[in-house]
Amino acid sequence: MTPFELAEPRSLKEAIALLDAEDDSVRPIAGGTALMLMMKAGVFRPTRLVALRRVAGGNAIELAADGSLHLGAQVTLGALERTKGLREAFPVIAQTLRTLSNVRVRNVATIGGNLAHADPHMDLPPVLAALGAQVTIAGPNGERKVAVENLFAGYYQTVLARNELIAKVTMPPHGGKRAAYMKVTTRSADDWPALGVAAVIDAQGRAVRNIDLFLSAATEKPTRLKAAEAVLRGAEADETTLKRAGEAAAGEVETMADARGSASYKKELVRVFVARAVRKALGLGDAQGRAA
């Protein structure tokens, strides 16, 4: 690796001041699980890294009385996994974390870094998007709030400017909704997925009142399945409706080929696993495959 400056600010304001809106070689670093690999491979050669681990308040975790969850951006995935009450308040997050990489990575990787990296194969972004999570973005001109759904602009791209940072992540109360994340891997259960489907459903029995359905890994960014949602919303989740939803989802997305499968293979996975994710969320069984 080439030499670079390492800055360790103690406040969010100081960290933002150390970034450069015009210089792509100046980057923030949180857990560094992805950035360090890029540096070792020579893909990225920084002139300055702004380490965020000492930023005040970044490790805060609050599971509020109303059921909402508030996280500082430097909260590690391991700390989130061990948060008291998480499994009861947000069981889908707790379940997803169990097969998100491995324990060593989760003990270093941060929630803010996970989102800012914008790798389309990440497990948490579709789950957080379906849950209605929101990030607070801090920059030179103050703060702005962006839904996780709208954070991603494309393949490894977000709406963050180079001198902006994710400061907080907030999840609204889960309430009585039902949720599931299904992860399809070609190797071990904790591997990068070939496809991920997150479903958060407000339902009475099989009757779907409302649904938030997101796809990842098969697409360039976490993608809302609007056509499939329209099929399911207000309908009974029987086999005919679930099949129609799977077909609608496959028809509305452009899948991408990578080392984990061809575009056509992933298209078929969409057809099958949208229905399976909905079944799993509603507790209807037949949730086959490796699921988080």
Image (cartoon, helix red, strand yellow):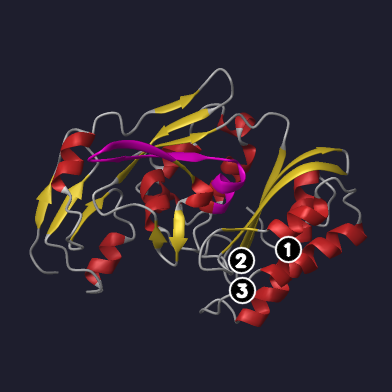
Q: CA distance from mark 1 to mark 3?
A: 16 Å
Q: Between disc 1 and disc 2, whose residue precedes?
A: 2
- Residue at (56% x, 27% y) in the render: 85
Residue that badge 2 annotates: 195
Residue that badge 1 annotates: 273
Q: CA distance from mark 1 to mark 2?
A: 9 Å
Q: Between disc 3 and disc 2, whose residue precedes?
A: 2
Q: Are marks 1 and 2 in contact (CB under 8 Å)?
A: yes
The picture quadrant where one finds residue 247 is bottom right
Disc 2 marks which amino acid?
Leu
Q: Residues within 10 Å of mark 2 (few under 14, many from 20)?
A: many
Q: Is residue 182 left or right of residue 161?
A: right
Disc 1 marks which amino acid?
Phe
- Residue at (40% x, 57% y) in the render: 158
Residue 97 horizontal/vertical position (percent): 53, 47
Q: CA distance from mark 3 to mark 2?
A: 13 Å
In the displayed structure, would residue 89 be above or below residue 125? above
Q: Is residue 247 left or right of residue 120?
A: right
Q: Does the segment drawn in magenta span residue 144? A: yes
Disc 3 marks which amino acid?
Glu
Q: Between disc 1 and disc 3, whose residue precedes?
A: 3
Q: Does the segment drawn in magenta span residue 130? A: yes
- Secondary structure of the residue carrying tag 1 is helix
Q: Are marks 3 and 2 in contact (CB under 8 Å)?
A: no
Q: Is residue 102 left or right of residue 60?
A: right
Quadrant assignment for the N terminus: bottom left
The magenta-colored residue range is: 126-145
